Image: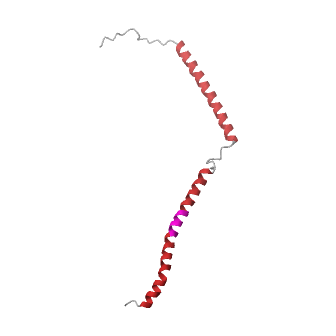
Amino acid sequence: MAIQPIDLQAIFSQVDKVGKTQNAMKDGLVMQQAMQGAHVERKNEQRIQSVNEAQNTGDGIEKIKDRREQHHEQADGKKNERENAAEAAAEAASTVISDPLLGRNIDISL
């Protein structure tokens, strides 16, 4: 099937439209990628500049008061433990432990 001259006239008149269409398709892809990149940048900036909501909002004034009370109770408990330990050390120092076998055997091994 040969190309007739009349067909060439129709094809040549449409070549510029085909070129414009292909160029628009290339530019459209580039433009779409640029728009997506700009959208991602805006989203990241918004995320960075926004104030994030606290993860655990269950801690209220009541919890803080409870923690303070627990802290004071723990401090009092530690103070009592220290006092008890000091008393036990004083009692241990005042009692003399005597071994009935003390001083009766001599170890001459080297």
On the image, which quarter does residue 86 sit in?
top right
Residue bounds of the magenta highlight: 27-35
Residue 33 in the magenta stretch? The answer is: yes
Q: Nearer the viewer, residue 51 or 53?
A: 51
Q: Residue at x 65, y 37 (%)?
A: 67
Q: Residue at x 62, y 29 (%)?
A: 75
Q: Position of residue 79 (x, y in %)?
A: 61, 25
Q: Position of residue 12 (x, y in %)?
A: 46, 84
Q: Residue at x 50, y 66 (%)?
A: 30
Above-or-below relation of 8 to 34:
below
Q: Residue at x 59, y 57 (%)?
A: 42
Residue that lies at the very extreme toward the right in this rendered image: 61
Model colouring: secondary structure
Q: How many numbered badges does the structure rendering display?
A: 0
Residue 109 in the magenta stretch? The answer is: no
Above-or-below relation of 76 to 61:
above
Q: Nearer the viewer, residue 53 or 45?
A: 45
Instruction: Indicate left or right for 83 with 3 as reference.
Output: right
Q: Quadrant of the C terminus?
A: top left
Above-or-below relation of 98 to 11:
above
On the image, which quarter does residue 7 sit in?
bottom left
On the image, which quarter does residue 64 sit in?
top right
Q: Position of residue 82 (x, y in %)?
A: 58, 23
Instruction: Indicate left or right for 8 with 77 as reference.
Output: left
Q: Nearer the viewer, residue 41 or 24?
A: 24
Q: Quadrant of the N terminus?
A: bottom left
Q: Main secondary structure of the magenta part?
A: helix
Q: Position of residue 70 (x, y in %)?
A: 64, 34
